[in-house]
Amino acid sequence: MDKLSAIGKWIFMYCTDFIINVANLTDTSYYEVNAFIFVFLWPIVTAGLLLYYIYLVIKVKQRRIKGSI
């Protein structure tokens, strides 16, 4: 369990350092970059993947219907 906790801490530190570096490169604050990622970017990617999944489900259903005729 200690190893899993250490991996979690390492991932958190890496992600935090990444956001700090992006903030420094773009001359913004940590909070602005964090908000951009988790308020705008993440929901857009999630919605896009959901729409893509629905598209694929429809395509599979269409192919099953065509294959059974």
Image (cartoon, rainbow, N blue to C red):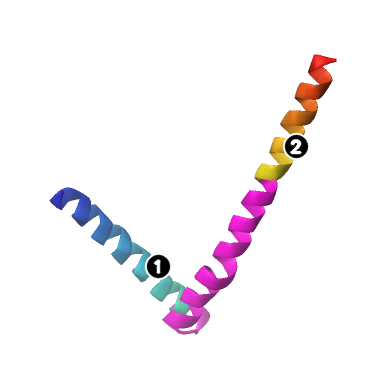
Give the residues in magenta: 24-52
Q: Which mark is residue 2?
A: none
- Nearest the viewer among 52 and 20 is 52
Is residue 55 toward the left or the right of residue 49 in the image? right
Instruction: Name the residue at 69% across, 50% down.
Output: 51
Rendered location of residue 63, percent (x, y): 78, 25
Q: Is residue 22 above or below residue 45?
A: below
The quadrant in which residue 20 appears is bottom left
Residue 62 sits inside the magenta stretch: no
Residue 29 sits inside the magenta stretch: yes
Find disc 2 in the rendering and name its residue. 58
Q: Residue furthest right?
A: 69
Q: Is residue 68 above or below residue 54?
A: above
The alpha-carbon separation of the residues under discs 1 and 2 comes to 38 Å
Q: Most prominent secondary structure in the magenta stretch?
A: helix
Q: Secondary structure at mark 2?
A: helix
Rendered location of residue 39, percent (x, y): 55, 72
Q: Which mark is residue 18?
A: 1
Instruction: Name the residue at 64% across, 57% down.
Output: 47
Rendered location of residue 10, percent (x, y): 26, 59
Is residue 43 toward the left or the right of residue 1 in the image? right
Instruction: Name the residue at 24% across, 53% down.
Output: 7
Is residue 55 toward the left or the right of residue 9 in the image? right
Q: Earlier in the sequence, mark 1 or mark 2?
A: 1
Q: Secondary structure at mark 1?
A: helix
The quadrant in which residue 36 appears is bottom right
Residue type for callout 2: Ile
Instruction: Name the residue at 58% across, 63% down.
Output: 43
Q: Is residue 41 above or below residue 8?
A: below
Residue type for callout 1: Phe
Is residue 16 toward the left or the right of residue 48 in the image? left
- Nearest the viewer among 27 and 55 is 55
